Image (tube, rainbow, N blue to C red):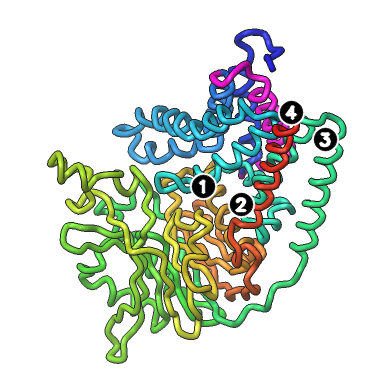
Amino acid sequence: MHTPLRPGLGPGLALLAGLAAAAGQVPWSLWPLALAGYALGLWLVATAPGVRAAAGRAWLFGCGHFLLALHWITEPFQVDAARDGWMAPFALVLMAAGLALFWALAGAVSARAPRRVLGFALALAAAEWARGRVLSGFPWAQPGHIWLGHAPEQLAAWGGAEALMLLTLAAAALPVAARWRGAGLAAVLLAAAFGLGAWQARQPVPPAPGPVIRLVQPDADQMLKWQPEWAGAFFARHLDLTAAPAARRPDLIVWPETAVPFLLNEPWDGLERMVAAADGVPIVFGVQRTEGLRGYNSLAVLDRGADGAPALRAVYDKHHLVPFGEYIPGGDLLVDWLSIPSFAPKEGYGYSAGPGPALLDLGPLGRVLPLICYEAVFAWFPRAVARPDWMLQITNDAWFGDVSGPYQHLALNRLRTIETGLPLVRVANTGVSAVVDARGRVVAELGLNRMGTLDVALPGALPPTPYARWGDWPAAVVWLLGLGLLLRRRALRH
């Protein structure tokens, strides 16, 4: 099938379709525009004249999508703009172009399908599933995320983000593949998703079990955070917020990621000051630590021992690190093979990965799944361990500006609560700190760039959701049914 477009028009429209599709992502959340963008992208790839043209249009479609959806990736380079600012546009363009290769592969595969619109929709769903897992994975700004903040997000309790992705691509593909009849089917599908999601969101959650958690948000500017003249002031700010009076004494105090200006193994008098400020209340805090030449981004639980001295109850090391942000992939090999120490975590550059997901037993507060920063965007982590009572994320989103990155991060964290039926406590350095109940509803929050505390009763947990039990299998069955229809069509043609 050859394109009816004039030569040269396809690439521009593909980019435009990607930009429109990205408009459905948080914080814009324009899902009707996103569906139109996906529909246009599906049509452009399906009508491309040949494999190469289909792959090229799909790649440009993906480039437009990721350029807008992930534009926050330039923000870390602005922390020290004089030194790093020139790299920002290159980072964004290379990131978008690289992630769009998954879409290009989907376009190439679909070029030989008997129903190319359905073929590209199915191939794109598979490519996005792979993007969330290949090379450590980056499941951010997926098609299904356009429903975050809208009623259909509740379907994630049944099939996770993949179910939302199939909903998006089906609603976009049906009108393209079957015109008015397809548009009618898409309307019915969306009406059912909104209706079921709205009903589920209204269902009650168990009452809060009692413990009150204090969230400490110091609003430490990333540009100043590690400067010697500021590091002590920000630590003092944590202490003051910890010791602030409350209507009810909290049962746990939580500080954000990398909250303290000392190493856990070299704390000088820092731990004593923390215990004194908390006055016997346990503190969970983000801290860096070293073992020999290796460094770790860690979460620690600090309490007052029987002798009144600080006592570390547990330590968790972040295991899923940010490529090129916290470590250089293959860095150990570079030092072993080429003697280039600047990329190797074992030589003190970047972090080393911890052993994996783990549960922390906090006694009367139950078992908690600790998540540091973007570990909370991976849906399979809560299912990699025994079921916790709740989830705890500490993060520092000051790296990602205040336009879209922190809001997208929070939305993905909310998605984890819907998938699992577990509440989440989220503490961020500059915001958004929040407590989210087991249906993804924000119970309380401290917005971006605000200093303060929140004392919130921990919400109750729901029984395990279908997604918590079965993972991606329900969505995989739906995908396989679509593939079966596609192959049946091919068989009938032959």
Q: Which residue position holds label 4?
A: 493
Residue type at mark 4 is Arg
Query: As drawn, is 392 to the left or to the right of 50?
Result: left
User: Earlier along the polypeptide chain: callout 1 or callout 2?
Assistant: 1
Badges 1 and 2: C-beta atoms under 8 Å apart? yes
Residue type at mark 2 is Ala
Badges 3 and 2: C-beta atoms under 8 Å apart? no
Magenta-tinted stretch? 26-52
**Mark 1 and mark 3: span between their CA atoms?**
29 Å
Task: Report crowding for label 3: few under 14, some 14 to 19, many 20 or more residues within 10 A (C-alpha).
Answer: some
Kind of element beneath mark 3? helix
Kind of element beneath mark 4? helix
Residue type at mark 3 is Gly
Badges 2 and 4: C-beta atoms under 8 Å apart? no
**Mark 2 and mark 4: span between their CA atoms?**
34 Å
Task: Report crowding for label 4: few under 14, some 14 to 19, many 20 or more residues within 10 A (C-alpha).
Answer: few
Badges 1 and 3: C-beta atoms under 8 Å apart? no
Q: Which residue position holds label 1?
A: 139
Query: As drawn, is 119 to the left or to the right of 379?
Result: right
Residue type at mark 1 is Pro
Number of the label disc, if any, that sits on residue 182: 3
Membership of 296 in magenta stretch: no
Query: As drawn, is 142 to the left or to the right of 268?
Result: right
- Front position among marks 1 and 3: 3
